[in-house]
């Protein structure tokens, strides 16, 4: 018996040691070769390697799926590059830094980090590898070789709000919101402004789930809004749970991230969607041409990075025409979503007539506009 | 609050509590035999993904439900083998099972993430019973899996308290040595109870992926397995109290969103911790009660049985 135990212990130790050795080997050998070949960047005929790290699985039907569509578009458009991705990478520094370093060691020259939580890890790793270009989605910190990118999602959100405002009969629209952060708050505000522009008596009821990713909980939150009299459900979540709740109750819904009609064909009116492909192509092209500079990119509908999903069958011709006209105005730069006068929930004028909120103000927005029924939880 | 909203909250409490109820009932059977299985979360996830895959491929949710139970049971046998046959530490094995189940379900479920299921469990009104005011809409206007859980409670309570098998089960959980000398096979009884526990945890997972939010997404149980483990203590190892507890735990979540729609703000973090606070309170009471009366955990819970150690 004792002998067996000793043997087991020995075997376990050997396995652990083998793993440690393998781990070190995998991490360090490519790093040293990398340093030698970092000089020639373009024109050698070698394929440029581009990598992505994703916070969720590529099949989440939402956020990460949209990024991966962009990656595939990039690979199709630019033949002389090679792309790869690592999915479901936690936002903890230990994991994010390990994956980022690993991608650098594999010879990637451009790395897209597609979630807010990777921000500090990206900056830390970028300092160590100045010859690699990092692009961080939705963050606000840059460096010589770190740029950020995001989209003015409030434009299509406003348009989807118009469709919802026209569809509602009860004049109560529910909004399932994930986290009380500016991105979600300005999403709700722009949606509400869209609703009010066509239906001044309607209000938007907000429920917070405090999760990005829990289909059962998100669905339950949508149900509670439907019970409270809402007949259209909008959302800022990563799963189609709220859409399913609306479909079951015979209500309508507004999707997010991707075209969500397949999940609730009778419910989804339309929805704001991401279209990362053109941005990825332009950025990688700039890197190849040597014209890339670190910047904070905040793309608009005119750039094609964001759009409105195709309408569901229940959206009438009149509404389509109305929304399409507004869309054209946004594309032509004739209409600004956050142009005054805008009042907050108490009725006080926050943005006076003739003024438009700056990007800085939008990105730090932590108050609700008039017409939102709900409050932002304090920390 | 008018009556309609209260009924809606209670009806949601029933559906939100059902996945926890299945898993907790399974864990009650498992723990009654003296085996602690902390792998509920993992078994639920494997059940959820297998159920979804089977239902997607076959187009029949009932086949999915069956597959989920089989898969949950299969995973639990790993635990049974490690803790009953090899007498490994039950806590460590259970935790490992949860980690394994989380990873394994993500791995095999990859191609199925984010696709809608065509045939799902839909609410069915039970004639007559659903017409009873208040009670009808709360309890008898759900999908078939909810009704099965009602029957399951009665069945399990009967098994535990009224049959020879249940007596053996409890004997093994209280005093395996005595049970052994009375001619009851400790390991066979424990294998059976762990397997039943795994099947029911799988069923709880399938309720999420086939009825509650019909889709498969990584880690979709989101901690419900742990709530089920806490619920077993809350219920003091009794199926009927598990029914009450699971609806309270499910109702807490439903209530949170309804309060928000009425502009009453309670921190969601507070609501999230409420089930566990309730469990701690019950634990305190139970521990005090055990000194005076005979209630509480099976005496041999968590201890591997070694015939030679007697």
Image (spheres, coloured by chain):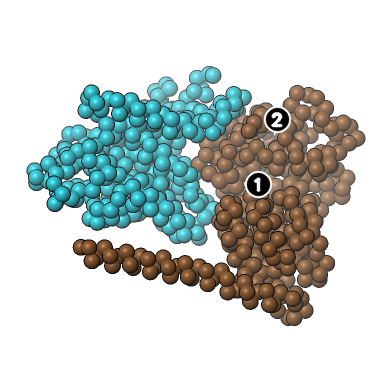
Q: Is residue A247 above or below residue A279?
A: above
- Tell me the SS state at disc 1: loop
Q: Nearer the viewer, residue B73 or B290?
A: B290
Regarding mark 2 in the picture, which secondary structure is present there? strand
Residue at 70% of width from left, 69% of height from top?
Answer: A109
Q: Give a yes or no on whether discs 2 and 1 share a subunit.
A: yes
Give yes or no for contact between labels 2 and 1 (Cβ–Cβ under 8 Å): no
Residue, disc 1: A256
Disc 2 residue crowd, few under 14, some 14–19, many 20+, Cα 10 Å = many
Residue A165 appears in the picture as rendered: yes
Left/right of residue A70 with respect to residue B94 in the rendered view:
right
Whole-angstrom CA distance, mark 2 to mark 1, is: 19 Å
Q: Chain of mark 2?
A: A
Q: Residue at x 80, y 66 (%)?
A: A286
| Residue that lies at the very extreme toward the right in this rendered image | A354
User: Which residue: 28% across, 53% down?
Assistant: B88
Quickly name the residue at label 2.
Answer: A372
**Residue B258 occupies which quadrant of the picture?**
top right
Q: Colour of chain B?
A: cyan
Res. B77 in view: no
- Residue at 24% over, 56% down: B86
């Amino acid at each position: 018996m004792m002998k067996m135990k000793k043997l087991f212990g020995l075997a376990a130790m050997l396995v652990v040691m083998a793993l440690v050795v393998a781990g070190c080997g995998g991490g360090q050998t490519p790093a040293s070769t990398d340093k030698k070949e970092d000089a020639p960047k373009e024109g050698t005929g070698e394929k440029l390697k581009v990598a992505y790290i994703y916070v969720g699985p590529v099949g989440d039907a939402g956020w990460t799926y949209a990024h991966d569509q962009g990656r595939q578009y990039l690979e199709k458009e630019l033949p002389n590059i090679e792309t790869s991705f690592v999915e479901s990478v936690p936002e903890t520094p230990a994991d994010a830094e390990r994956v980022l370093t690993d991608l650098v060691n594999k010879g990637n020259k451009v790395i897209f980090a597609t979630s807010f939580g990777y921000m500090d890890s990206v900056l830390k790793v970028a300092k160590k590898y100045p010859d690699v270009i990092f692009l961080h989605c939705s963050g606000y910190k840059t460096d010589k070789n770190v740029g950020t990118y995001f989209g003015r999602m409030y434009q299509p959100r406003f348009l989807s709000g118009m469709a919802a405002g026209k569809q509602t009969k009860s004049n109560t629209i529910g909004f399932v919101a994930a986290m009380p952060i500016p991105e979600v708050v300005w999403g709700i505000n722009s949606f509400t402004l869209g609703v009010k522009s066509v239906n001044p008596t309607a209000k938007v009821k907000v429920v917070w789930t405090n999760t990005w990713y829990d289909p059962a909980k998100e669905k339950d939150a949508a149900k509670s809004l439907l019970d409270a009299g809402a007949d259209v459900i909008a959302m800022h979540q990563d799963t189609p749970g709220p859409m399913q709740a609306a479909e079951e109750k015979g209500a309508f819904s507004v999707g997010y991230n991707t075209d969500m009609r397949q999940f609730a064909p009778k419910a989804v009116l339309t929805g704001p969607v991401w279209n990362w492909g053109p941005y990825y192509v332009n950025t990688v092209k700039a890197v190849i041409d040597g014209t890339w500079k670190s910047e904070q990119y905040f793309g608009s509908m005119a750039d094609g990075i964001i759009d409105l999903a195709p309408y569901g069958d229940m959206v009438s011709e009149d509404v389509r025409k109305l929304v399409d006209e507004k869309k054209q105005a946004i594309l032509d730069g004739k209409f600004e979503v956050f142009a005054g006068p805008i009042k907050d929930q108490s009725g006080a004028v926050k943005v006076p007539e003739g003024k438009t909120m700056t990007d800085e103000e939008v990105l730090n927005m932590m108050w609700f506009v008039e017409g939102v029924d709900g409050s932002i939880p304090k920390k | 609050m008018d009556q309609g909203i209260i009924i809606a909250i209670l009806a949601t409490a029933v559906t939100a509590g059902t996945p926890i109820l299945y898993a907790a009932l399974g864990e009650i059977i498992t723990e009654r035999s003296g085996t602690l299985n902390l792998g509920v979360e993992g078994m639920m996830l494997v059940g959820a993904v297998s159920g979804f895959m089977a239902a997607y491929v076959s187009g029949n949710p009932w086949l999915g439900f069956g597959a989920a139970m089989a898969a949950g049971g299969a995973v639990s046998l790993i635990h049974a083998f490690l803790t009953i046959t090899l007498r490994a530490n039950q806590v460590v094995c259970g935790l490992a099972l949860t980690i394994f189940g989380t990873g394994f379900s993500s791995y095999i479920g990859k191609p199925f993430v984010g696709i809608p299921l065509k045939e799902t469990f839909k609410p069915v009104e039970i004639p007559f019973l659903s017409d009873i005011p208040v009670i009808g809409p709360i309890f008898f206007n759900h999908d078939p899996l909810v009704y099965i859980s009602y029957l399951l409670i009665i069945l399990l309570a009967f098994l535990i308290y009224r049959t020879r098998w249940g007596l053996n089960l409890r004997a093994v959980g209280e005093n395996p040595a005595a049970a052994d000398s009375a001619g009851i096979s400790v390991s066979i009884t424990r294998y059976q109870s762990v397997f039943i526990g795994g099947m029911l945890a799988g069923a709880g997972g399938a309720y999420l992926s086939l009825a509650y939010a019909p889709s498969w997404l990584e880690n979709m149980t989101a901690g419900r397995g742990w709530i089920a483990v806490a619920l077993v203590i809350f219920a003091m190892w009794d199926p009927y109290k598990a029914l009450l507890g699971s609806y309270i735990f499910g109702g807490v979540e439903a209530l949170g969103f309804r309060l928000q729609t009425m502009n009453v703000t309670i921190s969601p973090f507070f609501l999230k911790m409420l089930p566990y606070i309730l469990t701690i309170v019950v634990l305190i009471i139970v521990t005090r009660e055990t000194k005076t009366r005979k209630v509480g955990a099976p005496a041999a819970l968590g201890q591997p049985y070694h015939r030679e150690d007697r």
